[in-house]
Amino acid sequence: MGSVGAKDVPVLMSPDGKRIDGRRADELRPLAITAGALKQADGSAFVEWGANKVMAAVYGPREVHPRHLQQNNKAIVQCRYNMAAFSVDERKRPGLDRRSQEISKVIAEAFESVIFVEEFPRTSIDVYIEVLQANAGTRCAGLVAASVALADAGIPMVDLVPAVAVGKVADSIVLDLKKEEDNYGSADLPMALVPQSGRLVLLQMEGHMTRDELHRALDLGVAGCRKIYDVMRQALLDKYRADGPAPGVAA
Ligand code: UDP
């Protein structure tokens, strides 16, 4: 984002504990999920989370391309996270960069650990994530969208995978960073987990925290993920109440 003078740094936390957008430390941005937003994909979901807008589409299990990636004992999970050129203030150069490759890889690995891949040998489960509007936390929004899309596609998996970024802003541990908090805060910790077991399937960190802050951040993230999980589940229930019985995740 380039360097800024101290006078340009926004006030991230008011004396009464309110954040730049008026949220408390443990408050999520508004989250709305539509399951089955696309007709052509096997499964899909559209997520509006704060100012983030993210579409996910899932295909499969289907034939593996390129062929040499095929595994005889399980399905492979391939993910492509893409940020649209128009999704951010300063036009993003189109195409896959190192950041998108990294995000695609960690999301694919997260799903590989929850999908029953052994049930579909020699196939591929393909996950496409398109970020149409970005305001920090897009890898988490992408994961949430893709997770609902996988369930919508009827892919058997342990459970839905909620995700959220926690961080450190003006010496406070806060849930679900928005852009200014991500840019000017001192730590950003995206995480995704299987809610019932608490097993983390994605955990990354940028910046610094003490051990105590890290523990508090993880607790806050777990509590946030449980709330996000409820919204994900509701999105699927809403779709299949209208359409008929839900495939995929058991109730
Ligand atoms: N961002 C941007 N241009 C880029 C990459 C990121 O403006 O090329 C912004 C965007 O709003 C994104 C935020 O920076 O959501 C934080 O990016 P980060 O790499 O931390 O990933 P995210 O928080 O989106 O998962």
Image: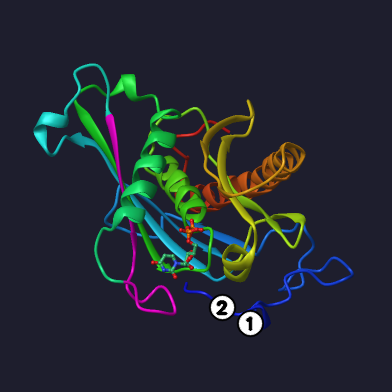
For the C terminus, the quadrant is top right
Q: Position of residue 213 (x, y in %)?
A: 74, 43
| The one of 235 and 111 positioned closer to us in this rendering | 111
**Cβ–Cβ below 8 Å for labels 2 and 1?**
yes
Image position of 198 with respect to 102: above or below:
above
The CA span between labels 2 and 1 is: 6 Å
Q: Which mark is residue 160?
A: none
Question: Is residue 101 highlighted in magenta?
Answer: no
Image position of 170 with respect to 155: above or below:
below
Q: Position of residue 212 (x, y in %)?
A: 77, 38
Q: Position of residue 26 (x, y in %)?
A: 76, 54
Question: Is residue 83 highlighted in magenta?
Answer: yes
Disc 2 target residue: 4
Disc 1 target residue: 8
| The one of 179 and 79 positioned closer to us in this rendering | 179
Lateral position of residue 72 relative to residue 164, left or right: left
- Of all residues, the one furthest to the right in this rendering is 16
Residue type at mark 1 is Asp
Residue at 47% x, 40% y is 246
Magenta stretch, residue numbers: 76-92
Residue type at mark 2 is Val
Lateral position of residue 13 relative to residue 198, left or right: right
Q: Position of residue 237 (x, y in %)?
A: 56, 47
Lateral position of residue 239 relative to residue 104, left or right: right
Secondary structure, mark 2, is loop
Image position of 199 with respect to 108: above or below:
above
